[in-house]
Image (tube, rainbow, N blue to C red):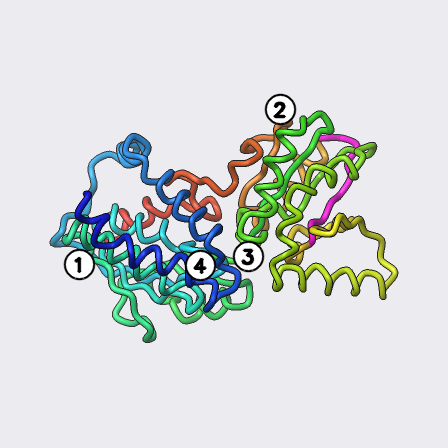
Amino acid sequence: MASINARHYEAMAAVIEKEHILNPWFTPRWVKEALCGIAHMLDRKGLASWLESYGEAKNTPGKALTVGLVMAGNIPLVGFHDVLCVLAAGHRVLAKASSKDERLILEVSAVLQSISPELGERIRITEDKLHDLDAVIATGSNNSARHFEYYFRNIPHIIRKNRNGVAVLNGKENKRELALLGQDIFTYFGMGCRNVSKLYIPEDYHLPDLLSVLDDYSWLAQHNKYANNVDYHRSLYLMNMQPFLDNGVILVREDKSISSPVGVVFYERYSEIDTVVQELETRKMEIQCVVSVHPSVPGCIPPGTSQSPLARDYADGVDTLRFLKQLT
């Protein structure tokens, strides 16, 4: 392992430090955050527990199929989990990486090749159109999903659309929990499908209390593209005379929508938690994860964990590994 580190350290360090020049959203801080998330996902005991839950693999090397991956590029290495699932199922990866993220996924693939040549040989990254596939997993916007559904209609597929994280507050969160909620909102500039973009708050909740804690993320306003987004929406709301709260780094606005623009988080007040639970169920196709400490919210995760998914935390709630294992 030491020799592998020596072989790849300089190349990986260069990608981490220079990526923001080509993609300003992929700062060294967020690239390192993504790599730490992958390390968390690849915990040996966690992986063993994940794979054991599926029993003995039905796929043998001789039956390996080619699975196409159309990767998103909204946050660093967002397509890694799909690569992991395809390899775990015994298949081959043919991936079309986003131009925003291809340098990172290529470098991680090179590391995997050094660790296990057998695994590395089953990963191919291409700039061409995907063809000769046995199955496909494609991630994109709601608009691109319609194209994917038609283009890949004749082969087994998983097509993912836009989703976002939401948070349900009960008004009793302490400062530490609110600070951790800030991680769920601001990590990757809020551009991930697991980032919290919508808050459900009690009717009497005092929003300035939350904003005062989120002031700790004021350093984000030094990032030009993020600050431009905040400035743009601030100007837009002011011109349209739409009310909002502003602490200089995030705009907080009342809105029933789940998905908010970069630099904005929406909120909605509630009087009964059962009403929120019912709405979360009704709108589950828009929601990737729910952050809450409220005991009445089913399936929620604690503040500060939305960007640290385990291998078993599948996007859109679709069991990717089971889908891959059942291919014939």
Q: Amino acid at mark 2?
A: Pro
Residue 268 percent across, percent down from the top left: 75, 43
- Choose the circle earlier in sequence order: 2 or 1: 1
In percent of the image, x 29 and y 65: which residue is there?
Answer: 125
State the image coordinates of residue 59 (x, y, percent, origin top left): 19, 47
Under circle 4, the secondary element is strand
Marks 3 and 2 close (CB-CB < 8 Å): no
Measured in 3D between alpha carbons, the distance from the residue under mark 2 to the one under mark 1, in whole angstroms, is 47 Å
**CA gap, disc 3 and disc 2:** 27 Å
Report helix, strand or loop for mark 1.
loop
Circle 2 residue: 295
Dominant SS type (magenta): strand
Which residue corresponds to mark 3? Answer: 162
Observer-side mark, 4 or 2, equals 2
Q: Secondary structure at mark 3?
A: loop
Residue at the disc numbered 4: 159
Q: Residue furthest right?
A: 241
Mark closer to the observer (3, 4): 3
Calculate the distance from the C-alpha at mark 4 to the C-alpha at mark 2.
Answer: 32 Å
Write the start and end of the magenta stretch as one range.
Answer: 264-273
Residue at image location 52% in from the left, 64% down from the top: 24
Label 2: few (<14), some or many (≥20) within 10 Å? Answer: few
Q: Quadrant of the C terminus?
A: bottom left
Above or below, 29 relative to 291: below
- Residue named by callout 1: 121
* Farthest residue, direction left: 62
Is 173 included in the stretch rendered in magenta?
A: no
- Closer to the chain start, of discs 4 and 2, is 4
